[in-house]
Amino acid sequence: MTSVYEGKQAQEIIFPIGGIGTGSIGLAGDGRLVDWNIFNRPNLGSANKFSAIFVKAMRGEEVLDTRVLQGDLLTALSGGETTDILQGNGGWGFGFGPYRGTMAGLPHFRKWQFIANFPFASIEFRDAKFPGIVTLTAWNPFIPSDAKNSSLPVANFKVEIRNNTADNIEYSVFFALNNPLPRDSAVNEYIEKDQTLLLRTTKRPSDDIHYGNLSLSTTNQEISYQRYWYRSEWFDSLIMLWRDITNHKRLPDRNYAEPQAALENQPKELRFDGEDVATLATHTSVNAGEVGIANFSLGWYFPNVENYWHPAATGKNQWKNYYATVFDSALAVTNYMKANESKLYLETTQFVDDLTATSLPADCIEAVQDNIAILNTSTVLRLEDGEFYGFEGIGMHEGICEGSCTHVWNYAYALPFLFPQLERSMREVDYRYNLAPSGEMQFRLMLPLGREPDNFRPCVDGQMGGIIKTYQDYKLSGDTEWLKRTWPLAKKALEFAWSPENTDKWDPDQSGVITGRQHNTLDMELFGPNSWLEGFYLGALAAASKICEVVGDPDGEKYRDMLKRGQVYVKDNLFVNQHFIQKVDLTDKSLLEAYTDPRDQQIWHKSIVDAYWNDEVDEIKYQIAEGSEIDQVLAQWHANLAGLDEIFDESQLRAALQTMYEQNFKHGMRDTPAFGRLYAINDESAVQICAWDPSWPKPVIPITYADESFTGMEYALAGLMIQTGMVQQGFDIVQAIRERFDGEKRNPFDEFECGNEYARAMASYSLIPAISGFAYDLSLGKLGFKPQTTASSFKSFWSVDGAWGTIHFEEGAITLKVTYGEIRLSEIDFRDRVTCSIEDVAVDELPVDFEITREAVMLKTPITMNAGSTISFTKKG
């Protein structure tokens, strides 16, 4: 869905351009190139010195105008816009004005519009003094199920200039790229046969953490280049660059024989300090009314990754990027990009077209697209064998909350639907490295792989959520052999709930009800039964019973019995005041005294009693009690997405959702006390994590983060409302989130929580399977749809492992299209919507035999559909 931000509305935008697990470069809302997160760690607030794009217009020998391809700088006009060491050379801080490397002091464009359509971002520039309308488009390949080509360390830039004059104009586009490598070994060279500037380092071995290179390439034929800007002091280099691009028809080359001398008194943490800028230019003659195009590909290659955030005390602390196992240099990256650009651009465009065709409000599509962008940020790594790894979010210079944290990544539904192979790799490394013989799992994965696991404690939502995801991973891929290999490990994790070695005593009696100490994503422990974490347990039992049917495990019957008993308990004991609660006696100190664990001293330097007992009011701290907590029925959202049955009683579920809409959804925050982090303020609307009606008993010190608002949790609630038929209420919540992240107040591509570009926000993807009622089981060759709308026309994107496309409901027909990949189909389930009215089925307009069974269309002979194929269903009448 194209989103347009004009001028000041775009002041907070930074759009990430890069591949999955490669790091990224940020395109700011005004056109600057910022946040150079390509050195295997976050680098927010950075500019790679004077890297920028310039445009020049000439009529004959006359230079008409030259401008940096940027709009007005609207923030940090007093300076101090960043503390990043890569700014350098004039970024002196607050009180010195903006860093001059922003190019804000050079002629730039008066009007601009930022147009987002992930993974594409365009900025249209206009100025009365520049003879032409300039559009900069940045993008990277992003193709669901194609993890390799979606993981390229590359940013592509296309500059289109429409000649709106009556004359022939020659347009030159200059891309200046700084060499950030250690200045005592940084070298710039031009590779003529590839039309590429290669910025590399000498003297550094290939396994050095400082080793790497950058490649800037073009497919344009009329070009010039300059290997080095003028080396000197003060502001000389930029003065000379401006002279070179404004005084000459072509860019004059400049070369130096030796790298610069190393700087003295560098900050100890400094890794990349070079300042030798190279420039690649294209030159295009454009007739009146026509368009000239300049194409650039910027690739990077920094193969060596280290654990800088939590280094191992001994042994290996470094590994290679996945992309370094595919390419051997940035030059190889840009050459691959150029050779395959047409195909990659087409498939990326097809994905955008299909995704944005979904019949959802613009706010919802925007929420889906903008948060998928998190996969292209430094929140994500791909390990040497291609395994997927994620922080929770990122800080200015470090990942925040390591380890593919299970109770956060549980919410991130963009990955399992768009790149199921990468999602399965998360299950594989989690069970391989985090599962103890007892079945206890750590919820953070330590790097490098194989090092000693973390020694915190297990968490209910992460451990049980992984079992639900295991079942979902199987259905999205249909890989029964994978499930058979994985199930014994997942089973051990499930049965830890009643293991004698479980010192948190989750469900020692196998009652189907978790009653013990329960760590969770709100970074504390709950005591006593509660629908939120109990729901995860019930969902895991439901998934486990289904898996047992597939692999022939007789314990499935036991799990089903525990599930039923747990459901009865929840229905009869945890539903109060039209919502689900935590059943706990806050005055019972013995609930804490029952749990001792030496790890408590390591974490808090005190016992669980000292940490959780409020001795001034004689009450347990950090509990929900009878509050309305945003995730109280979260497990049903997971269950619906995985194709499991009802976890909660349907009427109680709807009542609880309505209560959250009335109690937790705050329409303006001015009169609502907030004691934690401020994610919504003033007149902004948001769903608070926990709320209490004045008539309900409330803990003196309630659950952590109770007054905060996490967008990932808000999206999950909105998705569940849509799944349950409360469609408009779900839309209302999404609209409130996107009004907070509107480009002017906050960056729409950075829905932060504990850090920037926070993984939980990818819960927004669930809005698509929620509105379409998407069901799937590739082991059966099955897809299903039940749109949550009564409209006669409905369209939606769908995606599974190896294939994606669209479903289109119309008055007299339904059409399923495969846009990409291959899928084998035997069954298409429209459930109670239209199945019984189907009278004809055709694949690529050729009739096929079918029958209606169990409210599904069963194909008598399974069919294999490839990209471009359609299957159509004609309704009676």
Image: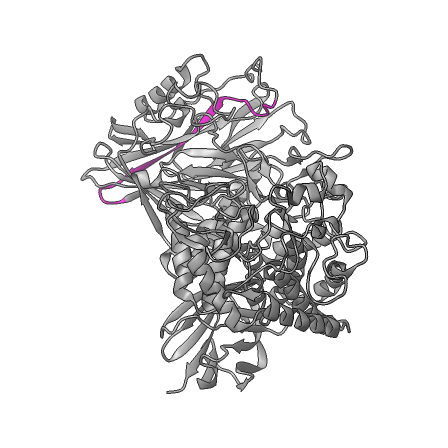
> As rendered, which of 237 and 477 lies closer to the eye?
477
Q: Tell me the quadrant of the picture where the N terminus can be found.
A: bottom left
Residue 512 spot, x, y in % from top left: 70, 67
Is residue 542 in sight in this rendering? yes
Residue 85 spot, x, y in % from top left: 52, 24
* Residue in view at x 52 percent, y 82 percent: 855
- 185 relative to 39, above or below: above
Q: Is residue 685 left or right of residue 129?
A: right
Is residue 805 in sight in this rendering? no
In the image, is residue 283 part of the stretch drawn in magenta? yes
Residue segment shown in magenta? 269-290
> As rendered, which of 670 and 77 lies closer to the eye?
670
Q: Is residue 603 left or right of residue 862?
A: right
Residue 637 spot, x, y in % from top left: 54, 63
Q: In which quarter of the view is residue 317 placed?
A: top right
Q: Tell me the quadrant of the picture where the C terminus can be found.
A: bottom left
